[in-house]
Image (cartoon, helix red, strand yellow):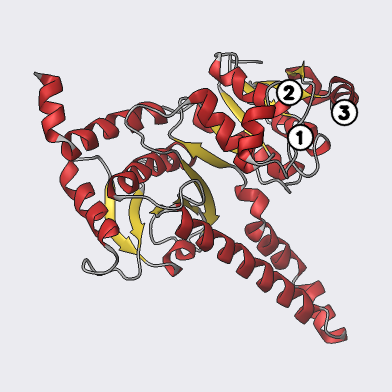
Amino acid sequence: MADGLVLSIDGMGGDHAPDIVVEGVDIAARANSGARYLIHGDPSRLAALLEKHPNAKAVSQIVPAEKAIGMEIKPSQALRQGKGSSLWNAIAAVETGEANAVVSAGNTGAFMAISMFRLRTMEGVHRPALAARWPAASGGYVVILDVGANVQADSEQLVEFAIMGEALQRAVSGAERPSVALLNVGSEDQKGHEEIRAAAKLIREAGVDLNFRGFVEGDDISKGTVDVVVTDGFTGNIALKTGEGAARLVGQLLREALTSGPLAKLGALIAYPALKKLSARMDPGTFNGALFLGLNGLVVKSHGGANARGFAAAIGVAEKMARSHYREEIASNLKRLARASHPAASEEEAG
């Protein structure tokens, strides 16, 4: 039964849209979450696909869109030419209150640009951040942000990222007090550049309600040393892409080793259940669904090359976030940060 939650879906965004989009909605609908879906795109193509996926059809409404934004389109072009596209209309549904969240596997730059233009940033947020989840040795996952929205970030913006990432981790994982740390070249207090050290000082002195653990290094991300790792978009994007590349390399080397001869193939057959479990743990689709945090609306980005199961995972993130109180938690901590960062302005406002 529907419970009032509505998700706006860009039906034409991504490398394999609209097929995997509709199939992903169908997978999500089977979970009986109570959500309804507005799927924006080519009505004839979407209708044909929904006929093949009755679970999705039962809870979805097609919203016609005259065009789609290609993966090659620049953000500036998307802002000038994107009106009426499936991506533009999907975001607009959140702006008007028709939907609680938007999910797209489409052009990341265009998605970010249109979302910022239509939804604007939350009060107290200088720049939104792109947050992703990364599997950890602990068995869970680590939230890392920013992973590409901002090439640079000053100390105050890093603290804003920490506040938003902590609220995301709590909403999606259910952890009561997620641990937070800043990514650095060492764990000692004197390590790192001025902005990273200033951010640590500000977190400790601002009175924000965070379980702050100081600094962590790159290898701590996969270890799961903390629940949330905070950095600027330049460093975060490199760390994320490096980790993805390393995971693919390990998978390739493992396949080569297990098919190198008759005995290796026999060993692989014996170890198949364990290997299948390992493959599931390393599958990026399991943790698909990055978020643009800090906007006046919930925006979830699926990987452009995701399969249907991966897209369904992104939908699941949107559902959990939409049912949480993360925005209120972020707003409360941002007010504390503003008072600590700009005491004179806060006193004048209070007076």
- The x, y position of residue 36, in whole percent, is 67, 19
294 relative to 267 in the view: left or right: left
Quadrant for residue 325, please give it: top left
Q: Which residue is drawn at 61% across and 28% down?
A: 102
Residue 11, can we see it? yes
Residue underneath mark 1: 21
200 and 341: which one is in front?
A: 341
Name which quarter of the figure residue 107 lies in. top right
Three-letter amino acid code of the residue under disc 2: Ile
**43 or 266, which is in the foreground?**
43
Q: Residue 349 bears which disc, if any?
A: none
Residue 63, quarter of the rendered image: top right
Is the Cβ of the residue at disc 3 closer than 8 Å to that at disc 1? Answer: no
Q: What amino acid does circle 1 point to?
A: Val
The residue where tag 3 is placed is 49
Residues at discs 2 and 1 in contact (Cβ within 8 Å): yes
| Earlier sequence position, callout 3 versus callout 1 | 1
Residue that mark 2 sits on: 39
Q: Which of the image's four quarters has the C terminus?
A: top left
Q: What residue type is labelled 3?
A: Leu
- Residue 235 point in image, percent of width and height: 46, 60
Using the numbered discs, state the Cα–Cα distance from disc 2 to disc 1 in whole angstroms: 9 Å
The image shows residue 127 at horizontal and vertical percentages of 41, 39
Q: Residues within 10 Å of mark 2 (few under 14, many from 20)?
A: many
Which residue lies at the image location 82% right of the left edge and 73% below the top edge?
A: 269
Q: What element carries label 3?
A: helix
Disc 1 crowd rating (10 Å Cα; few below 14, some 14-19, many 20+) is: many
Quarter of the N terminus within the rendering: top right
